[in-house]
Amino acid sequence: MKYIYLLFLSLLWISCSSVKRFPMKSSFPISSGVSIGGNTEILYLSGAIPKVFDESAQKNSSKYWGTFTDQTRSTFEKIKESLEEKGYSLDNIVKMYVYIVPNDQNKIPFKKFMSVYKEYFSEPKFYPARTVVGTPALALDNLLIEIQVIAAK
């Protein structure tokens, strides 16, 4: 029984040693991504929000973050940069979760989202599985989109 227990612990250690965590560039207490090794490496990126659009605007105002289209494009650029830093590309994305704050008519601007999405994903063989959800709010005022992806290679 003792040997079975030791075997289990060694397998657990081996499997855990193939997990790579990528720290955030800030002190925020989450990983920017987690990669699980093996025959296929899987990378779980934390949710990405857009970069600041206008630093001269009042912090967290709508001008600070930009329009929905600005935010969507910026978020995809941020995801692209994060993937490339970790040795992946947009083509490696296998699953995408998109959280969108509805507009004043309580509708998500899906056509605007798709317009930007198609700039980054135009090859059907690289289309990720995707979920798009409307949410009443995100972590910061006037953020309109957050995207989380899982990539594999």
Image (cartoon, helix red, strand yellow):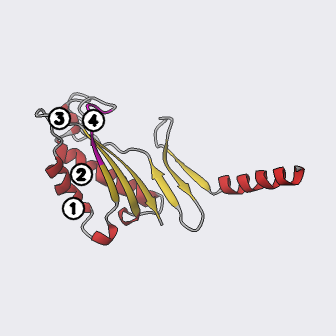
Instruction: Give the residue at x 48% y 67%.
Output: 153
Q: Earlier in the sequence, mark 3 or mark 4?
A: 3
Q: Residue furthest right?
A: 2
Mark 2 sits on what residue? 73
Name the mark nearer the viewer: 2 or 3: 2
Separation of disc 1 and disc 3 at Cα?
Answer: 23 Å
User: Decide: marks 1, 3 in contact (CB < 8 A)?
Assistant: no
Q: Which residue is mark 1?
A: 119
Q: Residue furthest left?
A: 105
Q: Earlier in the sequence, mark 1 or mark 3?
A: 3
Q: Is residue 77 left or right of residue 116?
A: right
SS under mark 1? helix
Residue matched to label 3: 63
How much space separates mark 4 and mark 1, taking CA atoms? 24 Å
Residue appearing at x 53%, y 55% in the figure: 35
Q: Earlier in the sequence, mark 2 or mark 1?
A: 2
Q: Amino acid at mark 2?
A: Arg
Q: Earlier in the sequence, mark 2 or mark 3?
A: 3
| Distance in Å between CA atoms under marks 3 and 4 | 21 Å
User: Alpha-carbon distance for marks 2 and 1?
Assistant: 9 Å
* Of 52 and 107, the residue lying toward us: 107
First in sequence, mark 4 or 1: give its number: 1
Q: Amino acid at mark 1?
A: Glu
**Residue 153 higher or lower than 23, as above or below:** below
| Label ID, residue 135 | 4
Res 90 → quadrant: bottom left
Part of the protein shown in magenta: 132-138
